[in-house]
């Protein structure tokens, strides 16, 4: 997927100016937050479960090669083929080759963010193979001229009922529907034909289980089952970090994933898929492929950002992020939005391609406290800021400004003088008013709010005067 | 019992913008029987540098503050954000400098946010303020989520006869300040602040109280831009100490 993260600031301002989007974001805000808060009450020791989940993920990341090899061996024993892709281009090449080998002309897809990373749909189309998104949100976006998703689990969360009603009326050529069940039924009717005719199904994977060689899929619409059981060929594409040791570990992580994501105790569908169809079985794919993708992940192993690899893609961080809630996911400019995206995009798509993202957070740590695997997202964002500074990627004025400020702040007399001047200058700017409407030294502040006037003298001045008068009167 | 020797870390923002908050903190500590010293060479804890990725600047300012505040029984800060920076981040800066790390750890163990110190350590029974009216409380992020400041300011306000606390919805939501975030992404920051102001208005309280001046300047600035000239925006120290 094209990286538009360098335009974060312009994108975020466009989001704020988009009245329809703002209305949709307001409607969506809080729904997942409230449901999650209720759902986690069902777990007696929620904090302990978070610790256990983080420990499972750490165990894997610390010996990722070992667990991947174990997964590969087990998966091969079940009749699956395991392939490795270094980057998105290799994903596209491998999947296209698999499709060609089996004479595939149509692929039904359940949701996969890695497919978005790799730009797989475009590659398949270019090879004359039709990709059909079957997750309702992804379907809406695909028929809307391949619009990118704005959320990792609710890709069309930025759209309203009206938006979808208009869209389906246009692309399906049917009378405009105004009820959600009617719209859903219409999508199902369109998709049913595709489910029956696709020769290949493509899914992501929430977890890969090393002890059984299985993939676990968490879905809500049932499309995942259609995609993975009806066609003769099933391809799973997922990141190498998705592997976990055992089914027992899966049960721990599954206590947290749906609750953190959508506030559900369990998703409507939860599948553990193992191997190809056996002779005595009635359904399932005859050919099963795993395409396990690096795309920057291996470089993160063992480094200072390795905690990010614990991520289980629940979306809780973005659901709770005040910035995400305000501007939506598109502003972030790549596959992954919100706090996790602001860490992943620089790591996977290049720190130089996403200068704004690590700064696009108030560091309020709402993300950190809801993360089911305790990723310290604000710390990681701050470390990325440090990397940018070290690499000289921040604007020169900002670097010089910070340096000068820190230099002065180490010299109390000079700093005191500067603060005295600053307090008076701000007071003068305010004049008779209680606040400043335009702050020439920081115009960004006053674009959307006033800057309150200072008292006019600094604490150190007033305190020194008080000490002097106390001593004088003593 | 000998009185506690407290070093007051005023914070750079209070020094520049609202000295009265510093004096209010001083009054609260003194009226609770502490001997309060204000080291005159203090400037900033270095959080803006740290959060902007300027490690060298942040470390230099941390060392400066550590050296200035050694020898006090306690260090008290009228800000959860600066307090958290001293208590949590200083130690993480000096992984390769054990001497400084130990000094940072020692400082962290003695550093408290103002209301936490008054309520938890001093266990004050009375406060000198005479504020009368209804207020709503904004929980600042670092104080709340990193330092556990939630009940302390409320418990102190509850000791004031004239104060009625009316909680707003979303009191724990970020106000959008975020330090340098507020001047890098001004419009987004102000849009988040607007939500906070809507919560404040919905509470019906004529005053909003908080423990961090950065958030308070952000909230006050947004209220005024929204045309609200009347809602008072106060630091909790001002309310507890009284304006006199």
Image (tube, coloured by chain):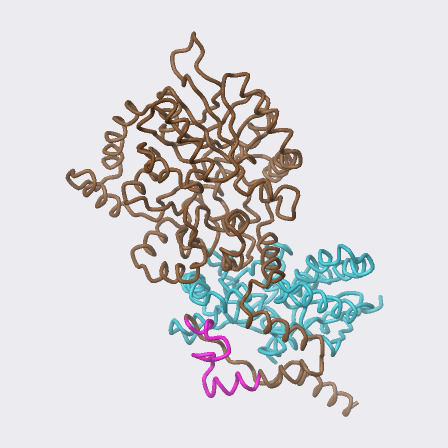
Q: Taking B213 as reference, is A418 above or below it?
A: below
A265 left or right of B146 in image: left
- The foreground one among A241 and A40 is A241
Where residue A342 appears, as percent x and y from the top left, is 51, 52
Is residue A253 shown left or right of residue A193?
A: right
Residue at left offset 34%, top offset 29%? A107
**Above-or-below relation of A409 to A49:** below
Magenta segment: A423-447
Which hue is chain A drawn in?
A: brown
Quadrant in the rendering for residue A168 = top left
Residue A233 % position (x, y): 39, 22
Tell me the cyan chain.
B
Q: Is residue A136 magenta?
A: no
Front position in the image: B46 or B111: B46
Residue at the image position 65 percent from the left and 75 percent from the top: B22
- Residue furthest to the top in view is A280
**Along the viewing direction, whichever of A404 and B70 lies nearer the viewer:** A404
- Is residue A48 something that shows in the picture? no
Image coordinates for residue A427, horizontal then vertical, percent: 52, 85
Which residue lies at the image location 73% right of the left edge and 60% below the top edge?
B121
Furthest-right residue in view? B1
Q: Position of residue A346 (x, y in %)?
A: 53, 52
Residue A154 appearing in the image: yes
Instruction: Look at the image and tell me in which quarter the N terminus of chain B lies.
Output: bottom right
């Amino acid at each position: 997927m094209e990286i538009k993260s360098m335009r974060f600031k312009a994108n975020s301002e466009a989001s704020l100016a988009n009245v329809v989007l703002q209305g949709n974001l307001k409607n969506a805000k809080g729904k997942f937050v409230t449901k999650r808060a209720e759902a986690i009450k069902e777990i007696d020791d929620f904090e302990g479960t978070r610790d256990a989940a983080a420990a499972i993920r750490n165990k894997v990341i610390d010996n990722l090669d070992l667990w991947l090899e174990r997964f590969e061996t087990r998966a091969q024993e079940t009749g699956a083929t395991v392939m490795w892709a270094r980057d998105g281009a290799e994903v596209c090449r491998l999947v296209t080759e698999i499709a060609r080998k089996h004479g595939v002309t149509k692929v039904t897809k359940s949701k996969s963010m890695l497919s978005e990373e790799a730009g797989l749909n475009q590659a398949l189309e270019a090879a004359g193979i039709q990709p059909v998104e079957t997750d309702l949100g992804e379907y809406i976006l695909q028929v809307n001229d391949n619009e990118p998703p704005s959320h990792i689990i609710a890709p069309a969360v930025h759209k309203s009922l009206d938006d979808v009603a208009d869209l389906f009326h246009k692309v399906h050529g049917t009378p405009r529907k105004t009820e959600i069940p009617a719209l859903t039924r219409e999508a199902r009717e369109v998709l049913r034909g595709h489910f029956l005719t696709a020769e290949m199904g493509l899914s992501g994977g929430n977890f890969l289980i090393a002890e059984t060689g299985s993939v676990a899929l968490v879905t809500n619409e049932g499309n995942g089952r259609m995609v993975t059981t009806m066609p003769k060929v099933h391809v799973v594409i997922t990141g190498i970090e998705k592997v976990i040791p055992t089914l027992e570990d899966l049960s721990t992580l599954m206590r947290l994933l749906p609750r953190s994501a959508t506030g559900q105790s369990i998703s409507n569908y939860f599948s553990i898929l193992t191997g190809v169809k056996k002779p005595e079985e009635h359904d399932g794919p005859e050919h099963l492929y795993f395409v396990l993708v690096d795309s920057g992940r291996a470089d993160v192993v063992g480094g200072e950002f390795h905690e990010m690899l614990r991520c289980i893609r629940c979306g809780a961080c973005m659901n709770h992020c005040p910035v995400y809630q305000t501007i939506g996911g598109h502003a972030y400019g790549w596959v992954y939005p919100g706090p996790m995206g602001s860490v992943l995009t620089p790591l996977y798509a290049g720190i130089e391609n996403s200068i704004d993202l690590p700064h696009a957070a108030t560091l309020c740590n709402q993300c950190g406290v809801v993360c089911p695997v305790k990723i310290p997202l604000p710390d990681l964002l701050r470390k990325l800021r440090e990397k940018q500074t070290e690499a000289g990627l921040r604007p020169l004025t900002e670097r010089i400004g910070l340096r000068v400020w820190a230099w002065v702040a180490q010299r109390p007399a000079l700093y005191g003088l500067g603060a005295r001047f600053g307090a008076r200058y701000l007071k003068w700017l305010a004049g008779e008013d209680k606040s400043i409407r335009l702050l020439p030294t920081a115009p960004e502040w006053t674009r959307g709010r006033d800057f309150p006037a200072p008292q006019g003298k600094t604490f150190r001045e007033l305190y020194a005067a008080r000490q002097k008068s106390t001593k004088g009167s003593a | 019992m000998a009185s506690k020797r407290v070093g007051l870390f005023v914070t750079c923002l209070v020094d520049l913008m609202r000295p009265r908050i510093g004096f209010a903190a001083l009054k609260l500590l003194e009226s609770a029987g502490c001997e309060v010293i204000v080291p005159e060479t203090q400037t900033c804890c270095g959080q803006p540098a740290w959060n902007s990725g300027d490690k060298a600047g942040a470390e230099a300012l941390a060392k400066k503050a550590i050296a200035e505040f050694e020898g006090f029984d306690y260090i008290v800060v009228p800000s959860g954000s600066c307090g958290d920076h001293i208590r949590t981040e200083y130690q993480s800066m000096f992984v390769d400098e054990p001497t400084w790390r130990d000094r940072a750890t020692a400082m962290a163990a003695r550093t408290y946010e103002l209301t936490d110190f008054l309520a938890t350590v001093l266990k004050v029974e009375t406060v000198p303020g005479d504020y009368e009216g209804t207020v709503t409380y904004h929980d600042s992020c670092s104080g709340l989520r990193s330092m556990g400041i939630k009940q302390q300011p409320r418990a102190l306000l509850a000791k004031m006869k004239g104060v009625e606390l009316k909680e707003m919805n979303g009191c724990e939501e970020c106000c959008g300040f975020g330090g340098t975030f507020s001047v890098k992404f001004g419009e987004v920051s102000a849009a988040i602040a607007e939500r906070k102001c809507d919560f404040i208005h919905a509470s019906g309280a004529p005053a909003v109280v908080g423990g961090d001046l950065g958030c308070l300047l952000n909230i006050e600035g947004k209220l005024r831009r929204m045309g609200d000239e009347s809602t008072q925006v106060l630091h909790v120290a001002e309310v507890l100490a009284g304006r006199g």
